[in-house]
Image: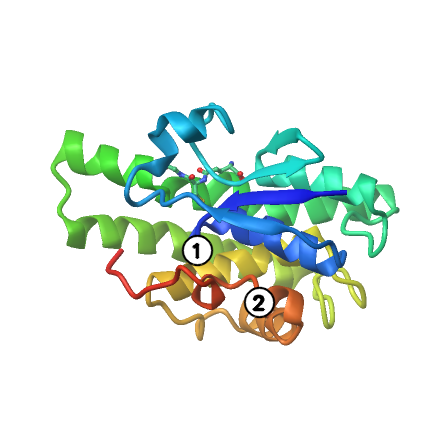
Amino acid sequence: MTLRLYGFWRSNAAFRVRVALALKGLDYDEIEVDILSGDQFGSGYAAVNPERAVPTLVHDGHHLSQSMAIIEYLDELHAEPRLLPIDLRDRAYARSLAAVSAADTHPLTVPRVRKHIAGVFGADPAAIERWCQHWISEGLATYERLLARRPGTPFALGAEVSIADIGVAGQVALADVYHMDVDDFPNVANLAKHCFSLPAFATAHPFAQPGYHAVST
Ligand SMILES: N[C@@H](CCC(=O)N[C@@H](CS)C(=O)NCC(=O)O)C(=O)O
């Protein structure tokens, strides 16, 4: 079996897939698509993923996109450890937690959105940074309220790591990229501490990627 991930060091969606691959112990190679330089629009990448976004996972020649769909595919391909709980209600809860970051907040911070608010509304780099920090903070606050209502330990659903934790940890990784601390969100901070103590999460972090370099947002 061969697995190739097209990603980028600061891509939060690629982070989610890296964590899932590592938790399942699946070997893969990663090809960098520099989405800050526009490589997602190049003719080479068009053949890989017409969405013009990362991640793309290529499994034995089969192309998969959208991080959540990729994680669910990996969960069905390689069941252990399960990232989607067996229990119907737990599974819905885990998916809903993951979606707070993957569907609601992270998409507001991606390069095409930043470029659009700069080009159409004249947002300067400081305004774009404030925009992103606002939505990241909103996501963290939503997670804090959800985790307070249903505390899990050490992970969101209890003893086992799940797709929910990938979402929460991803939101914290996003905060790291935007120079934000998570001190105001103690439940989130505690969950992230447990997640990032696992090599699968730590090695997936944007700052641990070979292409990482400190850039302004
Ligand atoms: N919903 C998609 C998000 C894909 C996405 O927007 N990826 C970003 C990086 S995290 C990207 O490649 N953006 C390119 C752009 O905005 O031009 C997923 O979860 O995979």
Does residue 152 lie above or below 114 as drawn?
below
Q: Which residue does the image show at 71% across and 35% down from the upper left? A: 60
User: For the residue carrying disc 2, how many other residues have a C-alpha within 10 Å: few (<14), some (14-19), or many (20+)?
Assistant: some
> What colour-coding does the image apply?
rainbow
Earlier in the chain: of badge 2 and badge 1, it is 1
Quadrant of the rendering where the N terminus is positioned: top right
Q: Which residue does the image show at 48% across and 68% down from the upper left? A: 208
Q: How many marks?
A: 2
Q: Which mark is residue 184?
A: none
Q: Which residue does the image show at 35% across and 42% down from the upper left? A: 35
Residues at marks 2 and 1 touching, judged by CB atoms closer than 8 Å: no
SS of the residue at dot 2? Answer: loop
How far across and down, in percent of the image, does residue 94 sit? 71, 49
Q: Which residue is mark 2?
A: 203
Residue 144 vs residue 3: left or right? left
Residue 116 vs residue 133: left or right? left
Asked whether mark 2 and ligand 1 are closer than 8 Å, the reply comes as no
Quadrant of the rendering where the C terminus is positioned: bottom left
User: For the residue carrying disc 1, how many other residues have a C-alpha within 10 Å: few (<14), some (14-19), or many (20+)?
Assistant: many
Residue 35 vs residue 129: left or right? right
Does residue 35 lie above or below 83 as drawn?
above
How far across and down, in percent of the image, does residue 162 sit? 73, 55
How far across and down, in percent of the image, does residue 72 sit? 73, 39
Does residue 45 lie above or below 135 as drawn?
above
In whole angstroms, how far apart are the C-alphas of marks 2 and 1?
Answer: 11 Å
Q: Nearer the viewer, residue 140 or 149?
A: 140
Q: Quadrant of residue 213?
A: bottom left
SS of the residue at dot 1? Answer: loop
The amino acid on which the numbered mark 2 sits, given as a three-letter code, is: Thr
Q: Which mark is residue 9?
A: 1
The amino acid on which the numbered mark 1 sits, given as a three-letter code, is: Trp
